[in-house]
Amino acid sequence: MQIDSRQLAAFAAVLREGSFEAAARSLHVTPSAVSQRIKLLEERLGRVLIRRSAPCVATDAGQALQRHAQQLQLLEAQALAPFGLLGSARVAGPGASARARGAEVPPARLSLAIAVNADSLATWFAPALAAVNEAHAVCFDLLVEDQDHSSELLRQGRAMAAVTADPRAVQGCEVLRLGAMRYRAVASPAFMRRHFAAGVTPLALASAPCNVFNRKDALQARFLRRLTRQTLQPPLHHVPSTHGFIHAALQGLGWGMNPEALVAPLLACGDLVEIAPGTVLDVPLFWQHWRLDSALMHTLKGCVREAAAKMLRG
């Protein structure tokens, strides 16, 4: 069975852009044309492929097709790159918008979806992307996800590559160990005086407010178990920002696990202190990407490995 390329492109665009209207703009066609192409594709395959939500997401049946669509786009981009044809096309035919019909569409860049945890993005990952961008005309669609859950985006077909704490290869993917990110448990001196005047005991830790990134963030709980050999449930502040996390600690909102690279200067000057000096968490990180013979993916892998080697622990 062959799949119409325009229908597949519309399907991929809806999931990439999040809505039928945004997909129509990116493809330079009308929203009704996108809707018609998706309808015909779903009828041909006999499955609902897109969940019409905000944003639109793939159904279970659509996830495998989403991965196939992204792989085809990557391979097509690689094949056209030597000819300077990446993304250039003359819009014509049914469904083209009146404004764009017959007009030359500016060359577009391939969009590469990558899942990455917020702390990596705030420390070592951006230089890797900059290095890739020097060699390839590509736009990055970064999906920020906890390192313990980012590999799931590979399984769903939403990401082509991921920084993850999962060493087990997702089916069809390669795995590369990058190193470990070291975390230290820190708080402000005033917070320490207020909550740990009698020592950092299990009782004090159970009542002292704790900062967590979001409801998937398990670093603080892991640290507490390592320190006390108990499962404690302290009051939680949800602070979904790497730099906001540090500011929350500086302001005495709570204690939390922060990347050593970001808090080392604040520890050195005394603005922050460790709640348990010498007790750290090293989180191993891995790079997983689809197993494709692509120059872009090879470059990306090399740049990620090089950037990680400069920041992460071996």
Image (cartoon, rainbow, N blue to C red):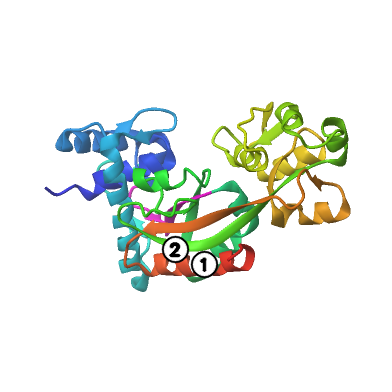
> Dot 1: few (<14), some (14–19), or many (≥20) neighbours within 10 Å?
some
Q: Secondary structure at mark 1?
A: helix
- The residue positioned 62% from the left and 68% from the top of the image is 310
- The residue positioned 38% from the left and 40% from the top of the image is 15
- The residue positioned 52% from the left and 43% from the top of the image is 145
Q: Secondary structure at mark 2?
A: strand
Q: Is residue 105 magenta?
A: yes
Q: Is residue 212 magenta?
A: no
Task: Indicate whether 35 appears above or below 264.
Answer: above
- The residue positioned 33% from the left and 52% from the top of the image is 70
Q: Nearer the viewer, residue 240 or 77?
A: 240
Residue 307, quarter of picture: bottom right
- Look at label 2 and name its amino acid: Leu
Name the residue tied to disc 2: 176
In the image, the segment drawn in magenta is 101-116
Name the residue tied to disc 1: 305
Where is residue 197 drawn, in percent x and y?
A: 87, 34
Tags 1 and 2 in contact by the CB under 8 Å rule? yes
Task: Indicate whether 265 appears above or below 216.
Answer: below
Find the distance from the CA under tag 1 to the CA under tag 2. Answer: 8 Å
Where is residue 258 drawn, in percent x and y?
A: 69, 47
| Residue 301 in view | yes
